[in-house]
Amino acid sequence: MKKFLALALSLVMALSLVACGGSSTEEPADEGETAESGETGGETGGSGKIGIAMPTKSLERWNRDGSYLQEQFESAGYEVELTYSDNDVTQQVNDIENLISDGVDLLIVAAIDGESLTTVLDSADEAGIPVISYDRLIMNTKAIDYYVSFDNYTVGVLQGQYVIDTLGLDLNDTSKTYNIEFTAGDPADNNAPFFFNGAFDTLKPYIDAGILNIVSGQTAFEEVATATWDTATAMNRMQNILASYYSDGTQLDVALCSNDSTALGVTQAIESDYAGSNQPIITGQDGDEANLKNIVDSKQSMTVYKAVANEAVVTLALAQAILNGEQPGEELTSQFDCECAYDTSSYDNNTGIIPSYLLTPTVVTADNIQEELVDTGYYTMGSDGYPVAVG
Ligand code: BGC
């Protein structure tokens, strides 16, 4: 524990602009490649090899996650093998098999499909390799020791609350009504229903009161989901909705999108195919550069930012405790500067509750980009006035 505090202190001193963790300028591995580096037993005392399996480089945030994790673990003296699996489930299974046969001491896995890793993680379990489920909960396996993520339900709540606040919705005033459409994430990603439910539950009283109308009638998660969180898929669906329900001049007031990759597609559809002259409220999540540009340009209204640098710091502390033979619990959270809750009730992967460390997401709009993203050190402001991610 002392070791970690010393490490945390040195990192904080070196990278004092970032609230709870470090930043990286290194490029992560190319898709389908493995980046191997780091000395075993570095100056901060960590020893061993860490296998990190990320889903894809095509969705922006995972590049930052891989980069931050690699930086954190290498700075702590661990050797790191980092894989990206091109959103291909079979490839991710192969990548994890290779990490196991390469003798990693601990696995950190952000699953492409939360239900497809049972067999390969059984092998990890048999080999005595602890597994941290990173950001997305891996289902149907007892091999998972811990889950590190953000409060996923709250992400959706923040999006829904933003709509309520921006439109000034009031349950006692049904004189003004608004039209809304939902776009959710990948059904294979356990996070996606959490985001959707958080937003939908928050807005449901206003939907029930007739203040918010879902003109397409597409209200169920399965109807509004977007396979692999793909931008073009989200764009095509919104184009169809606009053609079918809004071409007669019906006004679209809100496009509630679960994340930035889907918001990007929805924004493109609205730009090209929406007949109305108003700018609908469009929500997102992640702070992808293209979306921050759209926020600066008033094409997207907000994004829910999740400081993945902090997710990496929490993951490192947890991994160190596990590798030291400890059984970390609530007490681990006291060493973080950032908000992080220890949760033993929310995430059941069908084999029981998985103890979780959940960080707190933040709403980012054009008004607080500088304060929340640039002043904190997560982004720099480009000379063109658009934020550029660090790491
Ligand atoms: C992550 C989101 C991300 C989405 C698509 C989810 O599991 O939590 O931050 O937008 O995957 O990459």
Image (cartoon, helix red, strand yellow):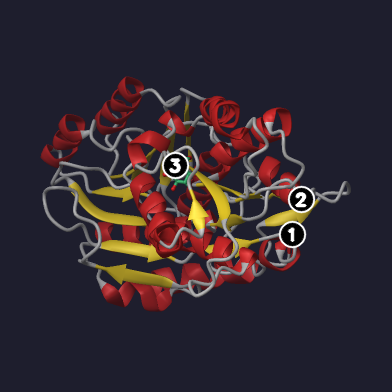
- Residue found at x 74% / y 65%: 367
Q: Of discs 1 and 2, which sits in the foreground?
A: 2
Residue 135, image x, y percentages: 39, 50
Residue at the spot x=45%, y=53% of the render?
A: 77
Instruction: Describe residue 290's horizontal placement relative to residue 170 as left or right.
Output: right
Which kind of residue does numbered mark 2 sit on? Ser
Q: Which residue is mark 1?
A: 366
Q: Secondary structure at mark 1?
A: loop
| Disc on the earlier residue, 1 or 3 | 3
Question: Disc 2, disc 3: CB below 8 Å?
Answer: no
Do tag 1 and tag 3 residues touch (Cβ < 8 Å)? no
Residue at image point 63% right, 40% down? 250
| Residue 151 makes an appearance in the image | no
**Residue type, label 3:** Ala
Q: Residue furthest right?
A: 383
Residue 172 drawn above or below residue 240: below
Task: Provide the residue designation for mark 2.
Answer: 298
SS at badge 2: loop
Gap in angstroms between the C-alphas marked 1 and 3: 23 Å
* Residue at figure coordinates x 40%, y 47% from the top left: 40
